[in-house]
Image (tube, rainbow, N blue to C red):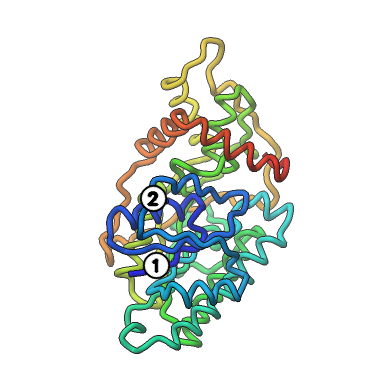
Amino acid sequence: MKIIVTGGAGFIGSALIKLILAETSDTVINVDKLTYAGCLETLEPVAGNNRYIFEKADIADRAAMERIFSEHQPDAIMHLAAESHVDRSIHGAADFVQTNLVGTFILLEVARAYFNALPDDRKQGFRFHHISTDEVFGDLEPDAHPFTEETPYHPSSPYSATKAGSDHLVRAWGRTYGLPIVVTNCSNNYGPYQFPEKLIPRIIRNALEGRPLPVYGDGSQIRDWLYVEDHARALHLVLTRGELGSTYNIGGKNEKKNIEVVHQICDLLNELRPVADHDYRSLITFVTDRPGHDRRYAIDCSKIGSELGWEPRETFSTGLRQTVQWYLDNDDWVAMICARQEKQDQFL
């Protein structure tokens, strides 16, 4: 197949592209406008692969999308391009509306026109796979059953609201126009190459620099953690074997309180990069909670397990150890990304 991956220079997208090129004979067209969180250096190992093509373009640019579809004649779209950081959405929602809603609309319209013009034999294999988040479901009570594919949407932040809206657009284009779609909603991803504004790499970075480790509120917010390479395997499985029109939840089966995650990172750093004058846990600092902060997310991923045979390979302990070790071994990458981003704004 020829697969367009939008947002392929991002954290999840780059892991997906590397998996596809390593484990299949497919060709990947990476469409990314390279915002602050996009990093082509992550894809240097595959840059010379003749089955990898990079297109710098904004999914909200209709002319660019029409050109890319016309030139590359894809068999599938895997749509990951999104503004994704909750704090940024609270401080400036406009970019989230533009990319997550308008961009998805443009991509759907271009994909629909392209699909309608395909010969019947190619229509049979075409897929539009939309990748979303568990945050669209909103807050989950401590004793409630984890989110299923039938859980009603109740987004809390501008980020999750725009992702919920994009999910609805994709499903509407499937039902109204007959576009062959599949949707996945995943839990919190972590692993190598994650942008340093996210919780796990930010805690690692701050700890190594001897800075405070900020924890929102009392740290009792619960998230389900999914190792990024497990997620990439699940995404490709859904694309190739998922039922058209269906939604699949993808979770790591690792519910953890934020403070537990921070403690585990500190303990790993105490083991792998000890310092003489303090325990990393002493750097933990509780800060004012984020507005509208959801208390718990948890994913029931039994559907993808029973229908497609997917299970996460990494536990949180094994995945976190690999992640921490990777950041210890790749401090040059972290420094490069942070320096580049800090030239654009002073968010971190």
Mark 2 surroundings: few (<14), some (14-19) or many (≥20) residues within 10 A: some
Q: Position of residue 287 (x, y in %)?
A: 68, 35
Percent across and percent down for residue 83 are 61, 57
State the residue at coordinates (44%, 42%): 191
> Dot 2 lies on which element?
helix
Q: Find residue 214 and report its horizontal and vertical position in percent.
A: 63, 33
- Residue appearing at x 68%, y 42% in the figure: 289
Q: Residue at x 53, y 75 (%)?
A: 67
- In the picture, measured across the screen, residue 11 lies left or right of residue 290, that is left
Q: Secondary structure at mark 1?
A: strand
Q: Nearer the viewer, mark 1 or mark 2?
A: 2
**Which residue is at 72% across, 44% downward?**
345
Q: Amino acid at mark 2?
A: Val
Q: Which residue is mark 1?
A: 3
The reply, left or right, for residue 171 in relation to residue 217 is: left
* Foreground residue among 164 and 338: 338
1 or 2: tag closer to the N-terminus: 1
Q: Which part of the image, by quadrant, shows the N terminus?
A: bottom left
Give the residue at mark 2: 46
Give percent across and percent down for residue 291.
70, 50
Compared with 313, 139 (above or below) is below
- Tell me, for residue 168, which label it has, or none: none
Work out whether residue 202 or residue 214 is closer to the camera in this orientation and state it.
202
* Gap between marks 1 and 2 measured at Cα: 15 Å
Q: Quadrant of residue 301?
A: bottom left
Which quadrant is home to the C terminus?
A: top right
Horizontal relation, residue 316 to residue 93: left or right? left
Residue 63: name its quadrant. Answer: bottom right
Amino acid under disc 1: Ile
